[in-house]
Amino acid sequence: MARNIKKRSDDYAQWYLDVIKAARLADYAPVRGCMVIRPEGYAIWEAIQRNLDRRFKQTGHVNAYFPLLIPQSFLAKEAEHVEGFALECAVVTHSKLERGEEGLKPGGELDEPLIIRPTSETVIGHMFAQWVQSWRDLPLLINQWCNVMRWEMRTRLFLRTAEFLWQEGHTAHETEPEAQEETLRMLDVYADFAENVLAVPVIKGAKTEAEKFPGAVTTYCIEALMQDGKSLQMGTSHNLGQNFAKAFGIQFLGRENQQQHAHTTSWGVSTRLIGATIMAHSDDEGLVLPPRVAPVVAAIVPIFRNPDEESKVRGFVEKLAAALVGGGDANRIVRHGTESWLFDQATEQRIVADFRDARPGDKHFHWEQQGVPFRLEVGPRDVDANAFVLKGRIDGSKQTIPIGEVSRQWLSDRLNAAHEALFQRAQKFRQDNTREASSYDELKQIVKEQGGFVRCFFKPDRANEAKIKEQTKATVRVIPFDQPGSRGKDVFTGEETDTQVLFAQAY
Amino acid sequence: MARNIKKRSDDYAQWYLDVIKAARLADYAPVRGCMVIRPEGYAIWEAIQRNLDRRFKQTGHVNAYFPLLIPQSFLAKEAEHVEGFALECAVVTHSKLERGEEGLKPGGELDEPLIIRPTSETVIGHMFAQWVQSWRDLPLLINQWCNVMRWEMRTRLFLRTAEFLWQEGHTAHETEPEAQEETLRMLDVYADFAENVLAVPVIKGAKTEAEKFPGAVTTYCIEALMQDGKSLQMGTSHNLGQNFAKAFGIQFLGRENQQQHAHTTSWGVSTRLIGATIMAHSDDEGLVLPPRVAPVVAAIVPIFRNPDEESKVRGFVEKLAAALVGGGDANRIVRHGTESWLFDQATEQRIVADFRDARPGDKHFHWEQQGVPFRLEVGPRDVDANAFVLKGRIDGSKQTIPIGEVSRQWLSDRLNAAHEALFQRAQKFRQDNTREASSYDELKQIVKEQGGFVRCFFKPDRANEAKIKEQTKATVRVIPFDQPGSRGKDVFTGEETDTQVLFAQAY
């Protein structure tokens, strides 16, 4: 088998692209910086959506849909916001194509240019202003799943693309404390999801002024460490104060009969989570998927050399597949092209019996590169022994398992153990790559030679952060909620402060 | 209670908008012709998506995501396609906003204009060409849920908006018969969904050349009759032949070792289905929702005048709600603002106990206008009688039900019966409004005086269809699969033909 994936130690950036290509998760689109999310990649996004959407609904939110196009003038209504987004937006100026002498050209120029939403605070603020009249109309707790565009210069599949898919929650509240409570509630939802579904350990905390969302009062985030020692922001939750309420007139008659502005929040995660998941867990052999978002949880590979062996093995594989799903109406066999899947309707997770016309070695290689948590190999001698060989993707373990042990619960237990093992491994990696610095020289040296998170005392300050970024490429990723409760010397100025931060280079 | 909904007989178009406004399903957006789908409307779309997505997956399809923006040159590659879509597309020409003397203006002009997808055959054809090399790569069975834009001149919420949400299935096959089989399979999926989920009876058949999708060989459709006697196209499924395969180079090495073009199909339904559902079932009191897509299936309205009565009624309502959901882990109480919902995680349908601070009469009015299938009223005397009053939205029926009769199955049976009653009512309306015409005068008279479907012999012909449209505003909505098997005289030319069609004015 030709090696089609670079080693992480040789070229981490190329390794990442190779893993995606080998697993057929995504391709670049014909428009610069845009991507096509292929079925194997999109199924991961569907698993993320299904799980998060349930969490949003359990916390009392409802979904809605707001328009793709935003009048240019809306963007300018919040001063910080326009500075943050004007330089990278797609602008619609015409409403048709006409035939000119040299072929098609834009026609029907619009009175006012429209931009494709980079985020929807402005248009949602405009609508909220119409929906909110009285304190009785609050809180508004709304989420939207949609596409957005930010025309970034340097793009990388899933991590930073011109168009991406995301969800954006937008809420309006009667009081400041309620808005703050909501902002932190959704940060907790994200953190719990990252750790208990994606198996990625995260640090919760606040952004500095320099790194916050344009227009927010405070931005909170979850940050995770990737295998190359860089930090990746996996989700953000913003307390917007009354900034957007004032810009768009979200006012209501309060309990004391006074007109006042609402307090709003917004929070989002995107297809970037797929990139984070790939980077956090995969290895030199290819993709490793956390079991709770893996589209295929188990692939059964039959091994045979002639029709007699095939029929012997096939009967056993059918018995094995039936034992794995444990029967029940929820599970249906679906034919997809030449593949046959056992499809769990509730989770949409699949068990595949791979009877395609290919060599067993090619099939092993295929399922390994797809990141499938478990491969089950069945040959004629296994059938005689009433057993099969279980290969774990995460640790490469190989075990012979008697078929009598197998049940739906058995598979579920194995998948939970695999999740736990992945999480522990990622957590150990983060522990091993989080270092303390007590001086700026030490900070510089760690960033340059070792990477990872650098924990140190630092009083957030725009000018000092800019200098440090220029000299080290590292930025304050997060002011963790978890603070020492003691005081120490600011790593840059030497002044006493009680604030610790995490510095790192970032995606 | 002030009347906020026009009668259908007074102003059908205004009635439709009033129903949407009263039920808070959607608003117009600040950009002309675009809409905001409010939570109550979006929940209907989520129910539609959940149900259709399961059907797509059961027929072997997988979801993927293709880019929003399409290079202008792609549109021109298929000759009919560009004619069909160039005149109504949103064109992106710039990549940022700059500060000019008079404020913001577009900057960073693009080398080639990009259009926002009106449909994705072109960009998906481009990607399929890269993914298909051999007959072993076929069939490709892909669906996409996304937003699209067509800058129509006259818009109407849900039925025709500049931006709308939809799904577009795109498949590629080795042979013509396989593509044809797929095209008809998906038409059947749509028809079954329309009738068994939305309770809207549909006619299956083909479009004439004049009405087919730009670029298709044949377009099949499902057509439904609305209460004003106009026809509404609810879904289409296109056999694209090799047209797009040739335009975008979807070629493969066949079983006989020869290069050949694939045969492709595409099929779609959109948020227009919500408009169809509203128009098919609602009445002068407001929205009537078919039970299988109703976000709220039952609303319990407590009636009390003092705290003693409230606590007495509250205890009973809790017992009633518990009986309706039948216990089980799938059901969770969710607090949304001041409301409390019993939320079924599998179907996402809700049962609401409406303890908001409002008069019972306002609550009755509210749930009636929301189209909720059943309202359950509980007052102190009902508690004494161990019963409640059940009010059916569809037929206005009122019954006293002993609480002992209530179970999850009881509710499910009631909802199924309500679905059946809605479907029967819509089917009877269609029967009563489908007339035969044996001459052009008769056709003209029926269209003018009665509306509805006119069934007649007619040999499809572009020129004749254009004349009839000009004179009557009616078009051939569908050449039904269900044909008489006899011959008759063409209603326009008088020539013998064996083809019957349905004429109607259309949305």
Image (cartoon, coloured by chain):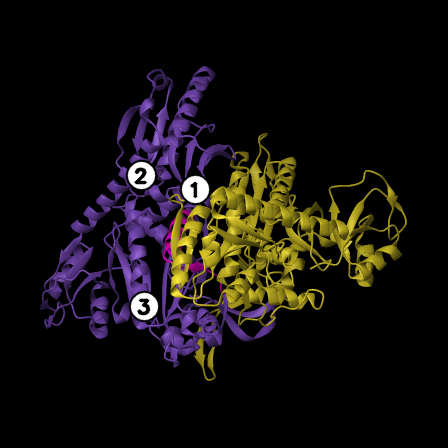
Chain colours: A yellow, B purple
Residue drawn at (17%, 59%), measured in percent from left and top? B454
Q: Residue extending furthest right?
A: A494
First-in-chain label (3 vs 2): 3
Q: Circle 3 is placed at which residue position? A: B178
Quadrant containing the N terminus of chain A in the rendered view: bottom right
Instruction: Say yes or no: labels 3 and 2 on the same chain.
Output: yes
Q: CA distance from mark 1 to mark 3?
A: 34 Å
- The one of A433 and A496 positioned closer to us in this rendering: A433
Q: Secondary structure at mark 1?
A: loop
A19 to A501, vertically: above or below: below
Corner quadrant of residue B288: top left
Corner quadrant of residue B246: bottom left
Chain that bears disc 2: B
Residue drawn at (39%, 23%), measured in percent from left and top? B303
Numbered range of the magenta stretch? B46-67
Q: How packed is label 3: few (under 14 Cα within 10 Å), some, or many (20 or more)?
A: some
Chain that bears disc 1: B
Q: Circle 1 is placed at which residue position? A: B346
Q: Amino acid at mark 1?
A: Ala
Instruction: Say yes or no: labels 1 and 2 on the same chain.
Output: yes
**Mark number, residue B64:** none
Q: Circle 2 is placed at which residue position? A: B285
| Foreground disc of the pair 1, 3 | 3
Q: Is residue A111 visible?
A: no
- The one of A332 and B25 positioned closer to us in this rendering: A332
Q: CA distance from mark 1 to mark 2?
A: 31 Å
Q: Secondary structure at mark 3?
A: helix
First-in-chain label (1 vs 3): 3
First-in-chain label (1 vs 2): 2
Instruction: Say yes or no: labels 1 and 3 on the same chain.
Output: yes
Quadrant containing the C terminus of chain A in the rendered view: bottom right
In the rendered image, residue A161 lying in the magenta stretch gets the answer: no
